[in-house]
């Protein structure tokens, strides 16, 4: 039997074209919910597991702890700072130095 011939017939933005952009499919949502439920059920055991690992491998325990934290506090993305038209950043800094003789009262900056 030949195809229906309507593959790709919906245009972007057509409300009949499927789920909105960025919305996970049902299987993905279900897997994430299962992982979250597992994590919540074992949160009390996490300290015990880390303590057990830390006895022999403290660096590994610290690494695992940091990796777990990334799920709670996500890593920040890198930020590239550039000047005009993607060029280098120009930094201008001025310093003011005032000399005061001993016993002389310091005056307010002008």
Image (cartoon, rainbow, N blue to C red):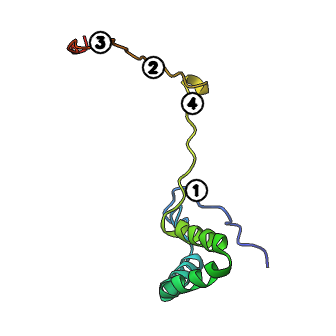
Labels 1, 2: front one: 2
Instruction: Determine whether the residue tagged by mark 1 lies in a helix, strand or loop.
Output: loop
Residue designated by label 2: 93
Quarter the N terminus occupies: bottom right
Q: Is residue 99 above or below residue 62?
A: above
Mark 2 burial class by Cα count in 10 Å: few <14, some 14-19, many 20+: few
Q: Which of pointers 2 and 3 indicates the residue nearer the eye? A: 3
Cα distance between the residues tagged 4 and 2: 18 Å
> Is residue 37 something one can see in this rendering?
no
Mark 4 lies on a secondary structure that is loop
Q: Say which label, 4 or 2, has the lower sequence index.
A: 4
Quadrant in the picture for residue 49 = bottom right
Residues under labels 3 and 4: Cα distance?
Answer: 40 Å
Residue topped by disc 3:
100
Residue 55: x percent and y percent?
Answer: 63, 81
The label nearer to you, 4 versus 2, is 2
Q: Nearer the viewer, residue 12 or 107?
A: 107
Residue 60 horizontal side relative to residue 76, left or right = right
- In the rendered structure, find residue 82 and report the number of the disc placed on it: 4
Disc 1 from disc 2: Cα separation:
54 Å
* Gap between marks 4 and 1 measured at Cα: 38 Å
What is the x, y in percent for residue 19? 52, 68
- Judging by the rendered image, the residue that carries numbered circle 1 is 11
- Count numbered badges in the picture: 4
Disc 3 and disc 4 in contact, CB within 8 angstroms:
no
Badge 4 or badge 1: first in the primary sequence: 1
Disc 2 and disc 3 in contact, CB within 8 angstroms: no
């Amino acid at each position: 039997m030949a195809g229906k011939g309507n593959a790709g017939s919906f245009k972007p933005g057509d409300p009949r074209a499927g789920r909105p952009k960025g919305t996970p499919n049902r299987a993905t949502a279900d897997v994430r919910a299962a992982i979250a439920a597992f994590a919540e059920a074992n949160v009390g055991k996490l300290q015990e597991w880390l303590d057990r690992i830390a006895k022999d491998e403290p660096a590994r325990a610290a690494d695992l702890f940091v990796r777990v934290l990334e799920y709670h506090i996500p890593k920040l993305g890198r930020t590239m700072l550039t000047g005009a038209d993607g060029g280098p950043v120009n930094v201008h800094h001025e310093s003011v130095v005032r000399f005061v003789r001993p016993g002389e009262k310091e005056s307010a900056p002008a």
